[in-house]
Image: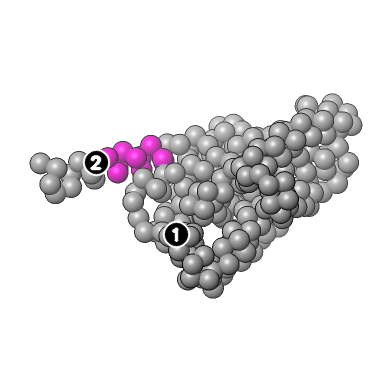
Amino acid sequence: MSMLFINSIIGGVFAGGLCGAVGALCSRLRLMTMAFSMAHAALAGSALALALGADMTSLAMLFAIMTAIMLGPLADYLGTSLDLISMTLFSLYNALTFIFIISTPGPALMTESIGQLLWGSILAIRPTYIAYLLTASIIIIAFLATFWGKISSILFDIRLAEAEGVNVKTYKYAILLIAGATITLALRITGGFLVFSLLYVPAAASLQLKASMKGIIALSWIIGSASASIGLAMSFLYDLPAGSCITIAALILMAMASAYSKLEASLAPGRW
């Protein structure tokens, strides 16, 4: 079996799992709009790196992390909602992305780098990249395990958590930073236009299965891993864009989760 295929499956397990778990947290905390903005910040950073001939991951990470850091304070300073600020930045990053792409020297639109930037590639999955994903997975699991008591109370009821003295903003911003780093890493596999689907769809699928909060995060990790692994395998076997294949796989798994939920509800006691 090709090492490229093996690497793609391993990379898919980690990247998809990270995105699924982070997506579940962002969905519960209503941070999806912010995550959407950070995804396009990472895309703009990658496009700038391409134009400058710099490292794509480093600039993408810088753009995403800086966006995560400034979203809250900027919304407070302007006296407007986080969602409005997020969508404003999203528009800005989209405009910058295309400016940077057009500014790339040479026949930019025909290069492999542009393809990887926009719709992902299994060629990006190398042992070093897998090591980054593994490290990020360990950090996120450690973060959740260490602070689960506070995080679970926030996920259950933000106002109640605030009344209990939990510094909700600190944990929300910490999760945003984690989301920014996760999006940047996943960007190389899914591409900038489809990375958000790996955050949203596994979380939406897990919610169909009506588990506990821990269960939803675990299921999102599993569904995200399966989506990315299956999608990357499809990309490898049929020479199709990685991001598109991952999105299709995630949507199929979501449809299966929804069908299972409907079937379970129809067979529940009291339905007949």
Q: Quadrant of the C terminus?
A: top left
Task: Give the labeled residue for mark 1.
Answer: 157
Q: Position of residue 86 (x, y in %)?
A: 66, 42
Query: How does the figure colour the protein chain or chains?
Result: one colour
Q: Is residue 255 magenta?
A: yes
**Where 147 sits versus 256, above or below?**
below
Residue shown at the point (71%, 33%) measured from the top left:
91
Task: Give the residue furthest to the bottom.
Answer: 146
Residue shown at the point (58%, 67%) measured from the top left:
167
Q: Is residue 184 visible?
A: no
Q: Is residue 233 left or right of residue 95?
A: left
**Secondary element at image label 1:** loop
Q: Position of residue 144 (x, y in %)?
A: 53, 66
Q: Position of residue 58 (x, y in %)?
A: 78, 52
Q: Is residue 180 visible?
A: yes
Looking at the rendering, the stretch of residues picked out in magenta corresponds to 254-263
Residue shown at the point (66%, 60%) measured from the top left:
131
- In which image quadrant can residue 173 be found? bottom right
Give the class, few, some or many, for how many residues have Cα within 10 Å of label 1's Cα (few <14, many ≥20). Answer: few
- In which image quadrant can residue 197 be found? top right
The chief SS type of the magenta part is helix
Residue shown at the point (45%, 63%) measured from the top left:
160
Q: Is residue 159 left or right of residue 59?
A: left
Lower position in the chain sequence, tag 2 or tag 1: 1
Cα distance between the residues tagged 2 and 1: 30 Å
Task: Give the residue furthest to the left.
Answer: 272
Type of the residue with mark 1: Asp
Numbered circle sitting on residue 263? 2
Looking at the picture, tell me which residue is in the foreground, 70 or 241: 70
Give the class, few, some or many, for how many residues have Cα within 10 Å of label 2's Cα (few <14, many ≥20). Answer: few
Type of the residue with mark 2: Leu
Q: Is residue 151 left or right of residue 191?
A: left
